[in-house]
Amino acid sequence: MKILGLDVGSKTIGVAISDAFGWTAQGLTTIHWDESNFTSADKELAEIIQMHEVEKVVVGLPKHMNGSIGERGLASMTYAEHIEETYQLPVVLWDERLTTTAAERVLLEADMSRKKRKKVIDKLAAVMILQGFLDQNSRGV
């Protein structure tokens, strides 16, 4: 069963996919979209879901450090509902606190230029979100 991981931002959606066994996450792409129109990413997302035979979607849920949910978290929750209704797939919200920060740190340590980091950070954050979910589930938790 392949699982799709999404890091939903206001302008881009980072996309990652699991292997068929649900062991590893690989970055796929970054979708540019208009957050005020949830359907603006539907065509690209539908193609990815069909091509990879996705059976579940994990959407990063940005929470504040105290665990509360702010504006970005609410937007991700609303988008997760849109995905569930549009594609008839189960959607899991996954706490993504610090994933973008961790992704930035990895890219800085790799000495990647700011311009290149900007192109891949959302995709790497999606990988970290999905891998966290896969690791947690592989332990039977």
Image (cartoon, rainbow, N blue to C red):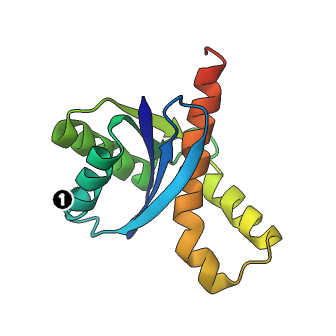
| 117 left or right of 36 in image | right
Residue 64 in view in this figure: no
* Residue that appears at 63% across and 26% down: 136
| 104 left or right of 78 in image | right
Secondary structure at numbered mark 1 = helix
Across and down, in percent, residue 80 comes to: 32, 42
* Residue that appears at 43% across and 66% down: 30
* Quarter of the image where the C terminus is located: top right
Q: Between residues 89 and 97, which one lies in front from this camera angle?
A: 89
Which corner quadrant of the image does residue 72 belong to? bottom left
* Residue that appears at 23% across and 65% down: 36
Q: What residue is shown with label 1?
A: 39
Across and down, in percent, residue 137 comes to: 58, 23
| 7 left or right of 112 in image | left
Which corner quadrant of the image does residue 124 belong to? bottom right
Which corner quadrant of the image does residue 11 belong to? bottom left
